[in-house]
Image: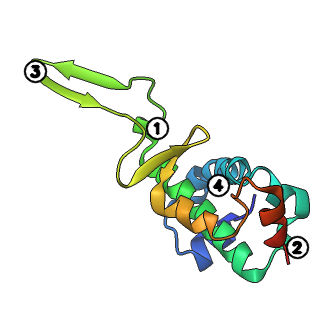
Amino acid sequence: MYAGYEYYSGTYGGTVPEPDILPRLRQAARDVDTLTFGRIHAVGLENLSTYQQEIIQECCCQLAEFAHENADVLESIVSGYSINGASLTLSGSSTAVETVSGICLPRAVYRNLCQTGLCCRSETRWRDAIP
């Protein structure tokens, strides 16, 4: 995990209880690895700049909270529902939420994670992001 419960509750200021948030923090780290093409795991979090580490930890906390708060919707296999003329469609993409590599996340979180330089598909460009 890139952000443990101590970081989540202390530095980040999260309020979800430990037993509920820990699995979400673990999954958030896996999602961040997917979004960064496994680069953090490959080079080690401690080998990144302090700025990159802070962004990664904060994004993990934000992803964990997002998953916790929206668990019913995110874990639903139903993408659309209608009854008596009223309908609801969950597309996985909106102005605030997007799906990247199969991961549904707030657009702002992905933009922040991109600031680390680790989400770039170019091998040369992301290597330049490592201090």
- Between the residue at mark 3 and the residue at mark 2, the CA separation in whole angstroms equals 55 Å
The residue nearer to you, when weighing 105 against 27, is 105
C-beta proximity under 8 Å, tags 1 and 2:
no
Say whether disc 4 or disc 2 marks the residue closer to the N-terminus. 4
Amino acid type of disc 3? Gly
- Between the residue at mark 3 and the residue at mark 4, the CA separation in whole angstroms equals 39 Å
The residue nearer to you, when weighing 112 against 56, is 112
The residue nearer to you, when weighing 131 against 64, is 131
Q: Nearer the viewer, mark 1 or mark 2?
A: 2
Q: In this view, does 13 lie above or below 3?
A: below
Mark seen at residue 47: 2
Q: In this view, does 128 lie above or below 30?
A: below
- Between the residue at mark 3 and the residue at mark 1, the CA separation in whole angstroms equals 24 Å
User: Could you say where residue 40 lies in the image, as x and y percent from the top left?
Assistant: 81, 60
- In which quadrant of the rendered view does residue 50 lie? bottom right
Q: Which of marks 3 and 4 is in front?
A: 3
Q: Nearer the viewer, mark 4 or mark 2?
A: 2
Mark seen at residue 24: none
- Between the residue at mark 1 and the residue at mark 2, the CA separation in whole angstroms equals 33 Å
Say whether disc 3 or disc 1 marks the residue closer to the N-terminus. 1
Label 1 environment density (alpha carbons within 10 Å; few <14, some 14–19, many ≥20): some
Mark seen at residue 25: 4
Amino acid type of disc 4? Leu
Say whether disc 1 or disc 2 marks the residue closer to the N-terminus. 2
Q: Is residue 48 above or below residue 124?
A: below
Q: Which of marks 3 and 1 is in front?
A: 3
Mark seen at residue 85: 3
The answer to whether 81 appears left or right of 4 in the picture is: left
